[in-house]
Image (cartoon, rainbow, N blue to C red):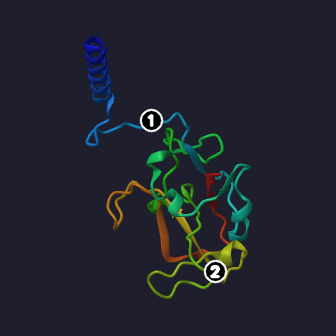
Amino acid sequence: MANWFRNAVVGLVLVVAGALLTREFTGAQTVTTTTAPARHYYLTKTAVAGNGALTACATGYHFASFAELSDLSDITYNKTLGQNAADSGQGPPIYIASINSTIGAGWIRTGGPSIAAAPTQTGDVGNCSVWTSASSTDYGEFAFLSIISNSYGAAKAPVVNFSPGVTCNTSLRVWCMQN
């Protein structure tokens, strides 16, 4: 009987020791890795008036909102579908205001209510009546990447033009995001 008791105690000690050795302590950090590919975004190669923005993106992509492009760190530019410039590398072209280049600018959804009029106060954003208008009296917003710092710091995300936008009959490229 003493052997049985001694063997039971030794077994119990081994089970407890094994549990303690394999236990995940609450203070330990775990690293999560994924093999999922990054979502892609792009700026269309062709330009459209405001009322063409909703249908300008390729199958599998949709007209992107500013919020979707506000952090470019975990999405990848699709160079095949997207507009490129001579020095784009693996990223999108930039907007260069000093030479009035719209190569890097495109219509972008703002997340606001249906507005066509020119903004009258800070915070107003136009969206070509939710992208149904191509009128020269209606307004929409466009976004661009810039290497120049903006009022929010270094340009890590697209800068959206909020003053006063451009007329909806203007032809601009469109920012697209993978579904």
Q: Nearest the camera: 160 or 36?
A: 36
Q: Is residue 82 visible?
A: yes
Q: Nearest the camera: 138 or 123?
A: 123
Identify which residue is drawn at 53% across, 41% down.
86
Mark linked to residue 10: none
Q: Secondary structure at mark 2?
A: loop
**Where does residue 14 sit, x and y in percent of width and height?**
29, 20
**Amino acid under disc 2:** Ser
**Amino acid under disc 1:** Thr
Q: Secondary structure at mark 1?
A: loop
Residue denoted by label 1: 33
Residue denoted by label 2: 114
Left or right of 156? Residue 60 is right
Question: Residues under labels 1 and 2: Cα distance?
Answer: 40 Å
**Where does residue 111 sit, x and y in percent of width and height?**
56, 71
Left or right of 132? Residue 116 is left
Identify which residue is drawn at 57% across, 84% down.
118
Identify which residue is drawn at 31% across, 19% down.
8
Left or right of 26? Residue 168 is right
**Where does residue 140 sit, x and y in percent of width and height?**
60, 74
Q: Quadrant of residue 98?
A: bottom left
Q: Does 18 sit above or below residue 146?
A: above
Q: Quadrant of residue 109?
A: bottom right
- Image quadrant for the N terminus? top left
